[in-house]
Image: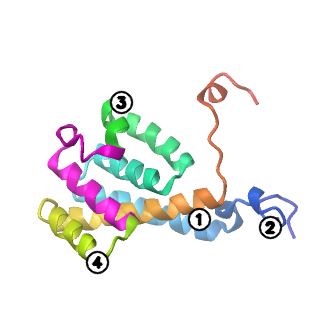
Amino acid sequence: MSTSKTADVTDPLSFYLDKSDPGAWNAVGGLATAAKRSAEAAGLDAQLVELVNLRVSQINGCAYCLHVHTQKGIEAGLDDQRRGLVSVWREAEQVYSEQERAALELAEAVTQLPELEELQVAQLSSSAVLSPEQYSAVQWLAITMNVTNRISILSHHPVRPAAQKSGSTS
């Protein structure tokens, strides 16, 4: 029907899942907006939100989302140290607040879906620190980031070198 490469599945490596169904992609965008609003309403700051987004994207191996949320983390005020150590936050616990550590633990559990006992430990320990609203919001943030990671990975979204982005006219 369409000649655009987004609708042509004959080359799945050039197929952009997000562009193939704008209605579904817009629904994911609506979910992301709702999750972010829930986080804000629960009193979670933008730095914590971006730490969760970065950690989930690291676990899933989504280069594009890591690129996007690194920039958003910078805009939220995350310094180089906190962005750089988020993959090993347990070993650098002094760098993160108790609330951030609880959110990261919960986000990892949501992403990895470990065996029941490990999942329950993460749920119990994080719910002891986070309010019910925060506990819910962190899970929705992680679920939403997992969805967008998968869409981005399946769409082969490219990460362009930073040098190309500035000063390039192509």
Residue 157 horizontal/vertical position (percent): 64, 50
Residue 85 quadrant: top left
Label 3 element class:
helix
Front of the two marks 3 and 1: 3
Residue 80, numbered circle: 3
Q: Earlier in the sequence, mark 3 or mark 1?
A: 1
Residue 157, numbered circle: none
Disc 3 marks a residue whose amino acid type is Asp
Q: Are discs 3 and 1 less than 8 Å apart at CB?
A: no
Label 4 element class:
helix
As drawn, is 17 to the left or to the right of 61? right
Label 2 element class:
loop
Q: Are discs 4 and 2 less than 8 Å apart at CB?
A: no
Give the magenta part as a residue range. 87-111
Label 1 element class:
helix
Question: Within the magenta stretch, is there residue 99?
Answer: yes
**CA gap, disc 3 and disc 2:** 40 Å
Q: Mark 2 highlights which residue?
A: 9
Q: Earlier in the sequence, mark 4 or mark 2?
A: 2
Q: Mark 4 highlights which residue?
A: 116
Disc 4 marks a residue whose amino acid type is Leu
Q: Are discs 4 and 3 less than 8 Å apart at CB?
A: no
Q: Earlier in the sequence, mark 1 or mark 2?
A: 2
Which quadrant of the figure contains the C terminus?
Answer: top right
Q: Give the dominant element type of the magenta stretch: helix, strand or loop.
A: helix
Residue 108 horizontal/vertical position (percent): 34, 60
Q: Are discs 1 and 4 less than 8 Å apart at CB?
A: no
**CA gap, disc 1 and disc 2:** 17 Å
Residue 25, numbered circle: 1
Which quadrant of the figure contains the N terminus?
Answer: bottom right
Q: Nearer the viewer, residue 2 or 96?
A: 96
